[in-house]
Each structure stands twice: as C-alpha cells, then as structure tokens.
Image (cartoon, rainbow, N blue to C red):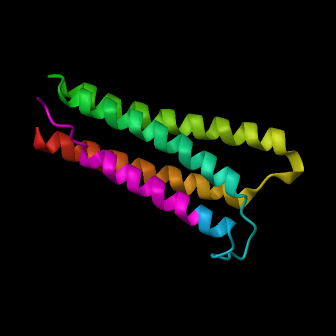
Amino acid sequence: MRKFRINKNYTALLLLFLIINLICLLYKNGYIHAALYIDINVVVVANALLFLLALFGTYRHIASVRDPNPNVFIRSIMMMTVLKFFVLCGAAIIYILLAKQNRNVPGIIIGMILYVLYSILETRGAFMVNKKK
C-alpha cells in the first residue's frame, strides 16, 4: 500500500496561507494595529483565491515535469503566472466596481503583494521539482 505523502511545495503554500489568515484574524480581533484601515475580507478573499490557484499550479507543474518535452514545463509556469494575474485583476476590478466609493485600496495592495509571494513560492517549488528530475 502506498503511503500518503505531501509534497514540500504544498506545505510551503499551506504555511503561507495559514500565516496570512492568522494575521488577518489577529488584526480583526484587535491584537494587531495598523496605521491604515484594512478591509480584512478583501485580504482573505485574495489569499484564498491565490492559494487555490497556486495549488492548481503546483499540481500542473508536477505533472509537466513528467513530460519529456522541456517546453511543457516552461509553458506551465508561464500559464499559471499569467492566469493568477488575470484572475486577481478581474477580482480587483469586480470589487472596485461593486464597492464604488467604499473600496479599500490598502486591501487591494496587500492582495498584489500576496500575488508576488505566491508566485515566488510556486515558481521556486516548480524549479526544485524540475531539478530533482
């Protein structure tokens, strides 16, 4: 029987997801104070969206490493980076259109920072998997 084993890439993504959610929970309960008002709902939705996309991307990267054509691996990384960017931009545009004057710019900026963090973790993990092959 094969043992269940979690890839290190998934562990790093899960750890980032949990840390961001913990910080949001502490901010919401008043344990952490910020100079600007940050809408936690915007940050949590962006974090969840990016986490799910990064999980899907990591799965795609691991599958693309098995392909004998090296272009598949590069296309997989580029596709997931662009897909995450467009999904996050689409979510931000929808949020801005729905919220109108009540939009929270610091929350959107934190979402962009999370995009960079998830992209770095996902790409680093993909290249580590490729190096092992």
Res 57 → quadrant: top left
Main secondary structure type of the part rendered in magenta: helix
Q: Quadrant of the N terminus?
A: top left
Q: In the figure, 116 relative to 48: above or below? A: below
Residue toward you, 92 or 32: 32
Q: In the figure, 9 relative to 15: above or below? A: above
Residue 124 drawn at (x, y percent): 29, 50
Left or right: 7, with 19 as reference point: left
Q: Which residues are magenta?
A: 1-23
Q: In the figure, 80 relative to 41: above or below? A: above
Q: Quadrant of the C terminus?
A: top left
Residue 121 drawn at (x, y percent): 36, 51
Res 59 → quadrant: top left
Residue 78 drawn at (x, y percent): 38, 34
Residue toward you, 74 or 113: 113
Q: Is residue 46 visible?
A: yes
Q: Is residue 120 visible?
A: no
